[in-house]
């Protein structure tokens, strides 16, 4: 663990960028994984949209980064992104379910198609 | 009196740790000392290349879907037997690594026999992820700067379902013996399902009758 991080908008942006980087550059678990989009919800939460199979639904995850980081005693955005990649995003999670939320607005043309996980 | 007990416990912990080092097993010493909830190492073994693999009890939150170790593997992915993890990590290729993580793959196969004819009808990929990173805290479990161990294991179905079929543990406990799995042409196998494990997918491959049946 490194020094405690301040979890703010900038941290959330770094997290989203680092997750996106896993989609592009990890050769480890990325069979059929495809990035749809990602963004920050004020003040410091992150939304990740993706597919985990070619014709699968658009899946969405909301990361409340303060509580997520607390599970690990505090961590960097890059470390948390890699953990999310390994333990959540590439870990089979089924089809998710629709939710009456606006978390995907601005990230995808039709936010209503997103199936939310966990 | 209380102080004496604490001192005694520390001595025992030290002895346990020393024994582990002497035995050369390489299991993190914290597992032998007073284990924190979830950090207990349930089993330890070697992969096909002699690398240490182990799995902790772990932690799992069904609401968030987050966790690691056998709790997550059992409750989220419906793999209950550590022997299933051992089969996958026994892949002769030694797995594939990225950084401190190593991935092992295997297959659980289903065989269906109808009217004396048998075929592999399903091969489900099984994956085990070993994490060699040393952590102080992981999903709320205090690991005392020891390695995490097997973080997750799951099936990869077409629908990316969270849970493995109920027969997967049974399959992974029964490695394929290709010679023995050939069917004696003189015998009619009973109709029904059976299961076997392999390191290559078997669905679509024929189960050949053992027409030669040489006397061994």
Image (tube, coloured by chain):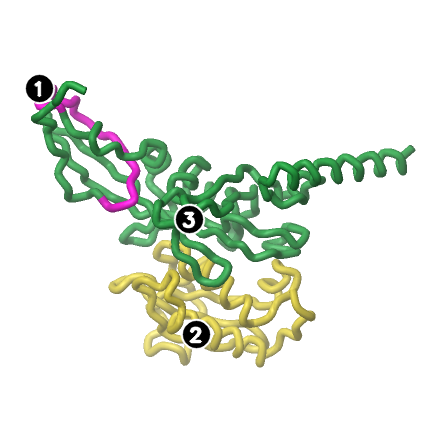
Question: In the image, is residue B199 part of the stretch drawn in magenta?
Answer: yes
A108 or B9, nearer to the observer: B9
Left-right relation of B183 to B123: left
Q: Residue at x 60, y 55 (%)?
A: B138
Mark 3 and mark 1: Cα distance apart in space: 40 Å
Q: Quadrant of residue A11?
A: bottom right
Chain part drawn in magenta: B184-201
Left-right relation of A2 to B80: right
Left-right relation of B127 to B12: left
Mark 3 and mark 2: Cα distance apart in space: 23 Å
- Kindly indicate whether the residues beneath marks 3 and 1 are on one polypeptide chain: yes
Q: Residue at x 17, y 22 (%)?
A: B190
Helix, strand or loop for disc 3 = strand
In the rendered view, tell whether residue B143 sits above or below residue A72. Answer: above
**Disc 2 vs disc 1: Cβ atoms closer than 8 Å?**
no
x and y percentages locating residue A68 in the rendered image: 58, 63
Q: Is residue B115 visible?
A: no
Helix, strand or loop for disc 2 = helix
x and y percentages locating residue A78 in the rendered image: 54, 71
- On residue B128, the disc is 3
- On residue A21, the disc is 2
Q: Which chain is yellow?
A: A
Counting labels gives: 3
């Amino acid at each position: 663990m490194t020094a405690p991080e301040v979890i703010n908008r900038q941290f959330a942006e770094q997290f989203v960028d680092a997750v996106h980087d896993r989609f592009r550059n990890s050769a480890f678990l990325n069979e059929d994984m495809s990035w749809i989009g990602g963004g920050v919800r004020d003040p410091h939460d992150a939304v990740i949209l993706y597919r985990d199979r070619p014709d699968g639904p658009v899946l969405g995850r909301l990361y409340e980064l303060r509580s997520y980081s607390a599970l690990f005693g505090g961590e960097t955005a890059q470390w948390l992104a890699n953990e999310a990649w390994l333990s959540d995003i590439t870990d089979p999670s089924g089809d998710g379910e629709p939710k009456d939320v606006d978390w995907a607005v601005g990230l995808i043309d039709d936010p209503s198609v997103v199936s939310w996980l966990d | 009196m209380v102080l004496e007990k604490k001192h005694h416990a520390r001595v025992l912990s030290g002895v346990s740790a020393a024994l582990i080092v002497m035995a050369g097993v390489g299991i993190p010493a914290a597992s032998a000392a007073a284990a924190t909830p979830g950090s207990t190492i349930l089993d330890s073994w070697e992969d096909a290349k002699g690398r240490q693999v182990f799995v902790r009890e772990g932690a799992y939150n069904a609401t968030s879907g987050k966790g690691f170790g056998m709790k997550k593997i059992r409750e989220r992915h419906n793999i209950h037997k550590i022997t299933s993890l051992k089969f996958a990590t026994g892949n002769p290729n030694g797995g594939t690594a990225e950084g401190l993580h190593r991935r092992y793959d295997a297959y659980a196969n289903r065989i269906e026999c109808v009217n004396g004819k048998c075929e592999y009808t399903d091969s489900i990929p099984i994956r085990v992820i070993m994490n060699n990173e040393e952590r102080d805290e992981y999903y709320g479990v205090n690991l005392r700067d020891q390695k995490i161990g097997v973080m997750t294991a799951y099936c990869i179905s077409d629908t990316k379902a969270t849970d493995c079929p109920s027969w997967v543990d049974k399959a992974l406990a029964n490695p394929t013996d290709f010679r023995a799995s050939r069917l004696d042409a003189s015998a009619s196998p009973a109709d029904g399902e059976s299961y076997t494990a392999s390191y290559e997918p078997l669905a679509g491959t024929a189960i050949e009758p053992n027409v030669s049946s040489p006397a061994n």
